[in-house]
Amino acid sequence: MIVAMMLPSATKVVLLAATLDGQERSLFALRSIAEFVTGYLSVWLAFSLAATALQWPLDAAGLLSATLAMSDHILAGSPL
């Protein structure tokens, strides 16, 4: 799901990087593009794992409602 949702938003940057690497299809150019895409998806994967790790204790403590909204008003306003 991360790939399906996040990669299309980075397509323009990936194509720009491919253009800046030149018209040649060298192994170096392909590797640098693959490293960029892998890094981009790794950052989103790390974020989703951190969000899941935060959600589990909040759910176990009963601080989330059935719609996954915070049920405590003070806790809901704390990010602001």
Image (spheres, rainbow, N blue to C red):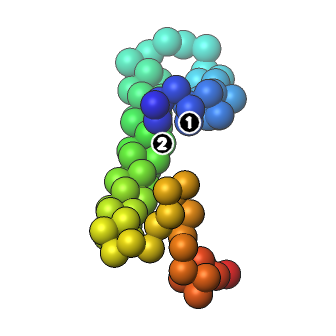
Element under disc 1: helix
Query: Given the current orientation, which residue lies at the most extreme front position?
Result: 66
Q: Residue at x 38, y 18 (%)?
A: 27
Q: In terms of image quadrants, where is residue 30?
A: top left
Compared to 72, does 13 lie above or below?
above
Residue that badge 1 annotates = 6
Compared to 44, does 54 lie above or below?
below
Asked if residue 33 shows in the view, the reply is: yes
Q: Residue at x 49, y 56 (%)?
A: 66
Residue that badge 2 annotates = 40
Query: Given the current orientation, which residue lies at the most extreme bottom position?
Result: 74
Q: In terms of image quadrants, where is residue 26?
A: top left
Circle 1: residue type: Met
The mark that comes first in sequence, 1 or 2, is: 1
Q: Are marks 1 and 2 in contact (CB under 8 Å)?
A: yes
Task: Tell me the quarter of the image containing the C terminus.
Answer: bottom right
Residue situated in front as seen by the camera: 28 or 3:
3
Element under disc 2: helix
**What is the C-alpha distance between the residues marked 1 and 2?**
9 Å
